[in-house]
Image (cartoon, helix red, strand yellow):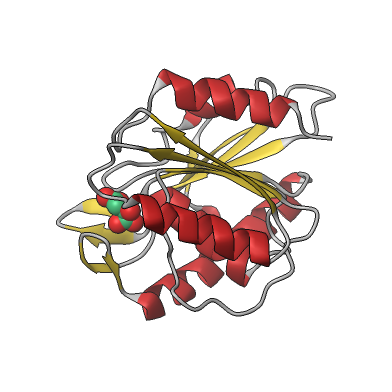
Amino acid sequence: MATLTDGGFVHRFVPGANADSRALLLLHGTGGDENDLLPLGQMIAPGAALLSPRGKVLENGMPRFFRRLAEGVFDHEDVVRRAHELADFVAAATRAHGLARPVAVGFSNGANIAAAMLLLRPEVLDGAVLIRAMVPLPDPPAADLSGRRVLILSGAMDPIVPEDDAAELAAQLSTAGAAVEHEVLPAGHGLTQADVTLARRWFAAAP
Ligand code: MLT
């Protein structure tokens, strides 16, 4: 398993186990990198192929997937540009590796870019697990997400993501036709064991 730089994103790719055609796109949080979520991906979908890029935007040296102006205040033009850039990378990587359309598993900033990709480039993802996500675009274009499953995992004590904001994201995705499940856990912004358990269960229940 090597760190690769082709396709414009530094990334890790872990091939799936034989006969497992599922693939996950792993998207880290602010300050993370392409290695962070590999163990989470293996726990959520053992045997699935894993594609894990590093965000290209640096905020005080910390990788992110798009620019923000302050905590919770996003540069929406950059969100759109970066979501398309990442979607192009994902489409090219899935073709190159002969993968199925992946399910995104994003944490925090990674969940936000995954939500933006779902709304802007619905053809690229099969669904998503969005952990501590918020609305990435206030007024997204109409998208057709019918047939896509989305699990949003929020924290009731999250100091970064207001409860209403995650609920609004759930509404945006449902309006676009996605089958959305939204769970609010007794948690803060950090990842918990309950996130792993619920994501694993959701993934295993895929039709
Ligand atoms: C963001 O995208 O900025 C997140 O929601 C918060 C963070 O990454 O710290």
Can I make out residue 36 in this image?
yes
Image check: 55 left or right of 170? left
Quarter of the image for the N terminus: give it: top right
Instruction: Inspect this view and state whether residue 87 appears.
Output: no
Quick check: 161 left or right of 18?
A: left
Picture coordinates of residue 130, whole percent (x, y): 51, 45
The quadrant the C terminus occupies is: top right
Residue 58: give x, y in percent of width and height.
25, 59
**Which residue is found at the position 23% from the left and 50% from the top?**
62
Q: Is residue 56 left or right of residue 69?
A: right
Give me the residue at 52% from left, 64% from top.
Answer: 116
Seen as rendered, the residue at the extreme left is 60
Residue 203 horizontal/vertical position (percent): 68, 30
Residue pictured at 48% horizontal, 61% vertical: 168
The part of the image, by quadrant, that contains residue 37 is: top left
In this picture, residue 206 sits left or right of residue 139: right
Please say if 99 is above or below 1: below
As displayed, is residue 196 above or below residue 122?
above
Q: Nearer the viewer, residue 11 or 170?
A: 170
Q: How many marks?
A: 0
Q: Which residue does the image show at 74% across and 22% down from the upper left? A: 17
